[in-house]
Image: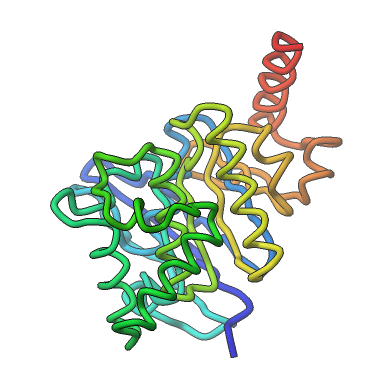
């Protein structure tokens, strides 16, 4: 049976200069999107990467317990097996000398799927994320695909691994409006159809309004507010949330 929840308790991340993330608690549920929002430098991306022990050099997770349905697990047990990752710069996640097919075959090989079954599974997963020209995509290298296509390829790899959770770190920030809309359509379809549980790190409150069920607001390494998405938009409690929402309303007004 697939796990229903993945959570991190009391996550703390430090550099040589001191703590950057202070006792963060986050919970992901299957079939829901939890948005983690905040200004640049608030610690939201570090929290996302820290859950899976994928922090940049010079930073360390000093505390934090991962729980799967309430039972302790290690980041190594979760990473790639139970939780996939989509990065802001997807090109950096791919080996530049390996084709998309090589990445897919390696992922499937780790799960005991090879040969014709692997090729069929890759085609199915690429179709699920809207990459219908799978033969061309699988032959391609990272430099030959757009950022939006690489974002969807990362989700396809998570589907191949059958991970029930996905951590997405600013996945739409470098995409144009059309690619962003296509990516979010795919993400929400997979949440609904496959019961994917998503941590969505973003500063874009429009993306939050469209996708999120729950929202956690970060400021200076702390969670300063948690609310259901409709409650947050109607009655923000923290100054950080009010500032983000005001900026969103000004931007939307300027585009009207």
Label tally: 0
> Residue at horizontal 25%, vertical 50%?
59
Where, by quadrant of the figure, is residue 158 drawn?
A: bottom left
The single residue placed furthest to the top in the displayed view is 254
x, y percent for residue 26 = 57, 60
Where, by quadrant of the figure, is residue 27 drawn?
A: bottom right
Name the image quarter holding the N terminus.
bottom right
> Residue at horizontal 56%, vertical 61%?
128
x, y percent for residue 95 = 19, 54
Please state which of residues 211 and 6 is positioned toward the viewer in this rendering: 211
In this view, 36 is above or below 139: above
x, y percent for residue 152 = 46, 51
The single residue placed furthest to the bottom in the displayed view is 1
| Left-right relation of 53 to 209 | left
> Residue at horizontal 68%, vertical 48%?
215
Please state which of residues 234 and 223 is positioned toward the viewer in this rendering: 234
In this view, 80 is above or below 200: below
Name the image quarter holding the C terminus.
top right
> Residue at horizontal 51%, vertical 56%?
24
The scheme the figure's colours follow is: rainbow
In this view, 148 is above or below 197: above
Please state which of residues 147 and 228 is positioned toward the viewer in this rendering: 147
Please state which of residues 215 and 32 is positioned toward the viewer in this rendering: 32
| Left-right relation of 51 to 206 | left
């Amino acid at each position: 049976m697939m796990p229903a929840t993945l959570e991190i308790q009391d996550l703390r991340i430090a550099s040589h200069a001191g703590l950057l993330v202070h006792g963060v608690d986050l919970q992901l549920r299957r079939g829901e999107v939890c948005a983690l929002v905040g200004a640049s430098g608030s610690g939201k991306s570090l929290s996302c990467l820290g859950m899976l022990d994928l922090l940049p050099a010079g930073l360390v997770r000093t505390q934090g317990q991962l729980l799967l349905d309430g039972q302790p697990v290690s980041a190594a047990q979760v990473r790639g097996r139970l939780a996939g990752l989509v990065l802001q710069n997807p090109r950096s996640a791919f080996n530049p000398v390996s084709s998309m097919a090589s990445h897919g075959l390696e992922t499937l090989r780790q799960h005991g799927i090879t040969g014709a079954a692997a090729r069929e599974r890759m085609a199915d997963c690429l179709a699920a994320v809207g990459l219908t020209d799978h033969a061309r995509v699988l032959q391609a290298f990272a430099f030959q695909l757009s950022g939006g296509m690489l974002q969807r390829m990362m989700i396809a790899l998570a589907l191949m691994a059958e991970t029930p959770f996905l951590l997405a770190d600013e996945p739409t920030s470098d995409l144009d409006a059309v690619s962003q809309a296509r990516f979010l359509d795919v993400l929400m379809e997979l949440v609904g159809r496959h019961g994917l549980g998503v941590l969505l790190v973003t500063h874009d409150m429009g993306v939050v309004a469209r996708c999120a069920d729950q929202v956690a607001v970060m400021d200076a390494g702390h969670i300063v507010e948690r609310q259901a998405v409709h409650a947050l938009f109607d009655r923000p409690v923290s100054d950080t949330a009010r500032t983000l929402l005001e900026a969103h309303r000004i931007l939307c007004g300027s585009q009207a």
